[in-house]
Amino acid sequence: MAVDTANGARISSFQVSESELLYVDFSNNNMAGSTFWPSPQSVWNWPPLVNLDSKPYQADIKGNRLIVAGNTDSKTNLRFYKIFQGNAADTSIVIDYVMKNEKSTSQKWAPWEVTRVAGNGVTLYEKGDVAPTGILEPFTEEIDGMIWYDQDKNKITQSGTFKFIGDGKGWIAHVVGGKYLLLKQFENIAQADAAPSEGEIEVYTARNSTYTEVENQGAYVSIASKDSVTWRVKWYARQLPANVDAKVGSASLVNYIHGILSRSVSPVSYNTIEKEKVKVYPNPANDFLMIDFNGVELCDARMAVYSMQGSKVIDQPISQSRKPVSVGNLSKGVYLYEILQGRSAVANGRFAIERQ
């Protein structure tokens, strides 16, 4: 997998056996590779928001993780972070997309991964509770609980929104050249939890079938001011065995995909690593607390402190620069703390305040 940090930190290449799985003609108005957008599109319309989609991201490498940070988009007040890491346990690439709300009030969004492949081959996913809808729906076929879209038999020659929206079961796959498989795995959501007029699965084919967008979306949720949500997608690339038939309706292909998914292993949690390393001291404290990150890189972090009665008494952003957190206004007693990245606690514990 190649990530172009100068072009929106989009995935610019994904190969297996030196064969490309993505559409990579970036001269086509940059409509290539795999990008990440906020949903619903009806809020921002077109064109894509440059700070999120195509402008450079700052990059850092920590161990086997590539961490990139974009700039805030003025229209949506969103800022994106992306974390890429290889997972040797099941030979996948794990991508954590972080959406931060920089607005002064809460707002609702869903995460949306848009992956462009060449306009041929077979796309399939497992049908959820709702059948596909949209202009491309007649080009799809349901067989044994699977939705199939054969682009080789359905060429798009007109312009327009040639798309279908569907409800899946947490994965979508695309076969290139009858031999190579791109498989994406993500959280399964109900259609009721999708963004307005959107869906967990979306497939769009451009005019003349130059490329197809194999898209997946997460839940439409409220994001508090200065808070963030994280959405994980896993990518697999495989060369299909000779005994796997890549045609529409192929039981061997479905069984092969289910086999990959059944062996899926989550990498050691980013949060688990941090819980072991992030330290808060001194304890007991008097006027200040120090936070030692021990080399852990957090995209967007803050510290929350609670009284033993459950009242939040401190909630402030923190950085890697080892600046102290003032606790001089707290009364003598015991307090609970959390170090948060978005909504996820990456460290927690308790400390005491002593006064002379």
Image (spheres, rainbow, N blue to C red):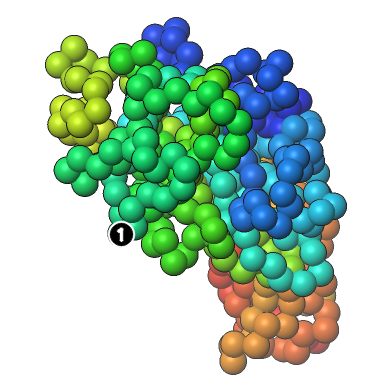
Residue at 25% across, 42% down: 142
Q: Quadrant of residue 51?
A: top right
State the residue lying farthest toward the bottom.
309
> Total of numbered circles in the picture?
1
Q: 234 or 191, which lies in front?
A: 191
In this rendering, is residue 284 above or below 98?
Answer: below
Q: 257 or 344, which lies in front?
A: 257
Q: Quadrant of residue 52?
A: top right
Whether residue 7 appears in this view of the structure is: yes
State the residue lying farthest toward the top.
18
Residue at 79% across, 76% down: 327
Horizontal and vertical percent position of residue 172: 38, 38
Label 1 neighbour load within 10 Å: few <14, some 14-19, many 20+? few
Residue at 48% across, 35% down: 214
Q: 261 or 68, which lies in front?
A: 261
Residue at 39% across, 62% down: 190
Is 82 left or right of 153, judged from the image as shown? Answer: right
Q: 14 or 83, which lies in front?
A: 14
Kind of element beneath mark 1: loop
Is 45 left or right of 154, judged from the image as shown? Answer: right
Q: Quadrant of residue 264?
A: top left
**Residue beneath label 1, please?**
129
State the residue lying farthest toward the front.
158
In this rendering, is residue 72 above or below 94?
Answer: below
Is 272 left or right of 300, judged from the image as shown? Answer: left
Horizontal and vertical percent position of residue 296: 63, 45
Amino acid type of disc 1?
Asp
Horizontal and vertical percent position of residue 121: 38, 21
Whether residue 233 appears in this view of the structure is: no
